[in-house]
Image: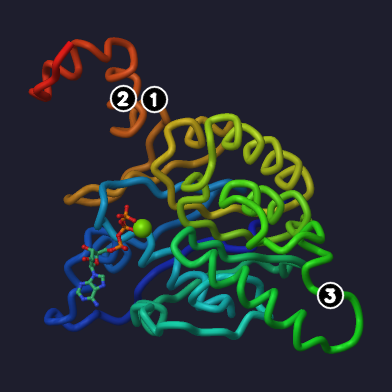
Amino acid sequence: MRDLYIRSMSLPEPIPRENYLANLPVVKYLSEKGIELHKQVTFFVGENGSGKSTLVEALAISQGFNPEGGTKNFRFSTEASHSELYDYLRVARGVIRPRDGFFLRAESFYNVASNIDQLDREGGGGMPIIASYGGVSLHRQSHGESFLSLVENRFGGKGLYILDEPEAALSPRGVIRLMQNMDDLVQDDSQFIIATHSPMLLTFPGAEIYQIKEDGIESVRFQDTDHYRTTVRFLQNPESAIEDIGLIHNS
Ligand SMILES: Nc1ncnc2c1ncn2[C@@H]1O[C@H](COP(=O)(O)OP(=O)(O)OP(=O)(O)O)[C@@H](O)[C@H]1O
Ligand SMILES: [Mg+2]
């Protein structure tokens, strides 16, 4: 892939100080320096509340996706809960436009599934929408199965895929399947921008990882993320980790 669909994000206008957005670490950094994307896979990682969802949601809305998730054709809304960051966000796009795209929010994937079923019930001529999602209602599959169906059947390549915690429903083997699918899609000129807490996913080869902290954002190797270190340290010696955090347990 010679160019990325999304090259950078910045905030040219200041956000009023009284707006909670102005105090999010990710927003402060966007205002000061902007964020450049260099790789076909970019991860945003950081503590709960650091602003990852706010950022990827604003990016998705700026690219014409429904705030609650889906393709650009989804227009349903169950609750208007998105922030106004997209009003301020400036996105530099590459020369070539993506041919496919999806915005996945783990939080509202259920509503995407309902919307597909509803549109198919209403009909509209042509192929049912669910056909391109593997043919089985996403409500008749488990959370993880439906998510993998989406990636394996609906993600068509040469696409922009913005994913918020795609690991939420997946077993460790499911995460590996997701990574295999991502690899195929990356080979086929796709770009992924992903908010995640998954140390496994962070090991995706060639990805850039932006770690959000109170004092800014830095590009780090997966081995240097808090998520990876904490998980490895914990799993290497669970007994001592449990003792360290002071759990009272009967053994
Ligand atoms: N309407 C609102 N008013 C005030 N603060 C809000 C509002 N909506 C969200 N926030 C705050 O914005 C912050 C960033 O939320 P966001 O969902 O982007 O975090 P996150 O990094 O995705 O966290 P997580 O890892 O838990 O998904 C949170 O601290 C949240 O409380
Ligand atoms: Mg989030």
User: Which quarter shows the C terminus?
Assistant: top left
Q: Nearer the viewer, residue 146 or 5?
A: 146
| Three-letter code for the amino acid on which mark 2 is drawn | Arg
CB-based contact (under 8 Å), mark 2 and mark 1: yes
- Judged from the image, the secondary structure of the residue bearing numbered disc 3 is loop
Q: Residue at x 65, y 47 (%)?
A: 145
Q: Residue at x 28, y 68 (%)?
A: 31
Q: Residue at x 55, y 70 (%)?
A: 69
Q: CA distance from mark 2 to mark 1?
A: 7 Å
Residue 50 image offset from top left, x and y in percent: 26, 56
| Three-letter code for the amino acid on which mark 3 is drawn | Pro
- Judged from the image, the secondary structure of the residue bearing numbered disc 1 is helix
Question: Dot 2, crowdedness within 10 Å: few (<14), some or many (≥20)?
Answer: some
Residue 237 vs 43, above or below: the answer is above
Residue linked to disc 2:
229
Residue 192 image offset from top left, x and y in percent: 59, 53
Q: Looking at the image, is mark 3 or mark 1 nearer the viewer?
A: 3
| Three-letter code for the amino acid on which mark 1 is drawn | Gln
Q: CA distance from mark 3 to mark 1?
A: 44 Å
The first of marks 3 and 1 along the sequence is 3
Q: Residue furthest right?
A: 126
The circle on residue 223 is 1
Mark 2 beta carbon near ligand 1 (under 8 Å): no
Q: CA distance from mark 2 to mark 3?
A: 45 Å
